[in-house]
Image (cartoon, helix red, strand yellow):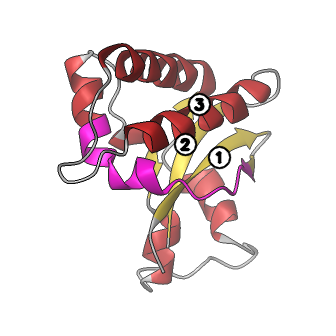
Amino acid sequence: MSTVLWANVLVNGTVQSEAEDRYALFDQTDKLDELCRSLKLPSFESICDSTDVRFNMDEFELPDGMESTNDYMALHGVWMALPEAIRMLDALLAHIQAKSVRFGLLTNQHDQVVSELTEVLAFAKAHQGDAAKFNFSIVQ
C-alpha cells in the first residue's frame, strides 16, 4: 500500500473529499514545499494533514461519537482558507509550467505533478461558493 494525498474541502463542518490518489504530489511534497518557499507562498506541507496516517499507526483512537478520521480532521485537522489555497496552488502550478520544473532525478514526474495539481485546482474551485477551507490528507 502506498501513501498518497487526497484533496479535501471543509463545508459547514463536514469534510468532502475528492478521494483521488495523488501519488506524485505526495512523492514530491518536499520539492513543492521548496518551490512555495522560493515563491514566497504559504508552505505546501502546511496544508498536508496527517490525521489518517496517525490513526492508522494507532497514535490515537476516535473519540466517542466520531465515526471516521474525517470527523476528527474536521475539528482538529490542518486547514487553509479555500481562497488562499487556490491562490497558492494556482501560483505554484503557473510557476511549474512556465519554468518546466523537473521533479525527480532518474525519472521526471513533471507531467504527473502538473496533471494532479490541475485536477486538484478544479476540485477546489468547484467548491468556492460553499467551502470555507482546504487541505490535503495524507492517506495510507
Amino acid tagged 1? Asn
Q: Quadrant of residue 61?
A: bottom right
Query: In this image, 60 relative to 106: left or right?
Result: right
Compared with residue 62, is residue 28 higher up or lower down, i.e. above or below? above
From the image, state whether disc 3 or disc 1 is nearer to you: 3
The residue pinned by badge 2 equals 135
Give the structural element (helix, strand or loop) at label 2. strand
Image side of residue 71 versus residue 116, left or right: right
Q: Can residue 132 be spotted in the picture?
A: no
Which amino acid, mark 3? Thr
In space, the residues marked 2 and 3 are separated at their CA atoms by 15 Å
Amino acid at the residue labelled 2: Asn
CA distance for labels 1 and 2: 5 Å
Question: Given this view, does label 2 or label 3 mark the residue nearer the observer?
Answer: 3
Picture residue at 75% right of the left edge, 31% below the top: 131
Q: Name the residue under label 1.
A: 8
Report the residue at 32% width, 23% height from top: 100
The residue range painted magenta reads: 16-32
**How crowded is the residue under tag 1: few (<14 C-alpha within 10 Å), some, or many (20+)?**
many
Dot 2 or dot 3, earlier in sequence: 3
Decide which of 25, 16 is in the foreground and name it: 25
Residue under numbered circle 3: 118
